[in-house]
Amino acid sequence: MLLYLIESAVPLLTFLLVWTLILALKKNIGKHKKIAIIYAVSTCVSIILVAVLVRVGFVIGENAPKWIMDIHLVFIYGILPLLLGLVVTAFKGKRFLHIGLAVTYLVFWCGSLVTGAMIFMMHHNWI
Ligand code: HEM
């Protein structure tokens, strides 16, 4: 139940990500920075909390096959270094590297959302 509570933060995190992306595209860099930092910290805290809870024995989506869980984890664990890269490139003013990482990041975020939704549906035998 606790794990599902943390997972329920995902729509809110996605909203923050879309918001910060729109701000960046509108060149409102000051606000983009603020929202992106709030997003990055909340995302890291959520991922770490879920990882710790899984380590101590909480389970989620246990009826889903292992292969989809493995793909999901590749996306999830890719998120942390990518976020770090986004912060570093932002503060060092490496604009093009930052944009490249942002595109990669969006692919990883979408990958986590799709595989996460698949795990949920497979767990409930919907697919
Ligand atoms: C994680 C914390 C982040 C911080 C502190 C941050 C900060 C910044 C800063 C300072 C710039 C201006 C760079 C420059 O002109 O030299 C920038 C640009 C940009 N950021 Fe971020 N960012 C973050 C995350 C993200 C994320 C998650 C995305 C989208 C997935 C993103 C997308 C962009 C884009 C597209 C630009 C280019 C805007 C333009 O056309 O000038 N950033 N960011």
Image (cartoon, rainbow, N blue to C red):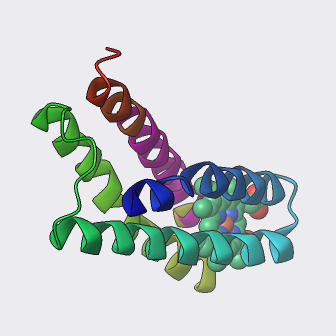
Magenta-span inclusion, residue 100 = yes
Tell me the magenta residue range: 98-115
Residue 127 location (% of width, % of height): 31, 14
Residue at 47% x, 48% y: name it.
Answer: 109
Q: Does the image show residue 101? A: yes
Q: Is the magenta stretch mostly helix, strand or loop?
A: helix
Q: Which image quarter is the N terminus in? A: bottom left
Q: Is residue 11 left or right of residue 58?
A: right
Q: Name the foreground residue: 88 vs 32.
A: 32
Q: State whether residue 53 is above or below residue 19.
A: below
Q: Does the image show residue 93? A: no
Residue 70 location (% of width, % of height): 17, 44
Residue at 52% x, 55% y: name it.
Answer: 100
Residue 50 location (% of width, % of height): 34, 66
Name the quarter showing ligand 1.
Answer: bottom right
Q: In this view, does 102 lie to the left or right of 55?
A: right
Q: Quadrant of residue 34?
A: bottom right
Magenta-span inclusion, residue 94 = no
Residue at 20% x, 32% y: name it.
Answer: 64
Residue at 36% x, 25% y: name it.
Answer: 121
Residue 75 location (% of width, % of height): 32, 49
Q: Is residue 26 left or right of residue 79?
A: right
Q: Name the foreground residue: 104 vs 67.
A: 67
Q: State whether residue 107 is above or below residue 48.
A: above
Q: State whether residue 104 is above or below residue 111.
A: below
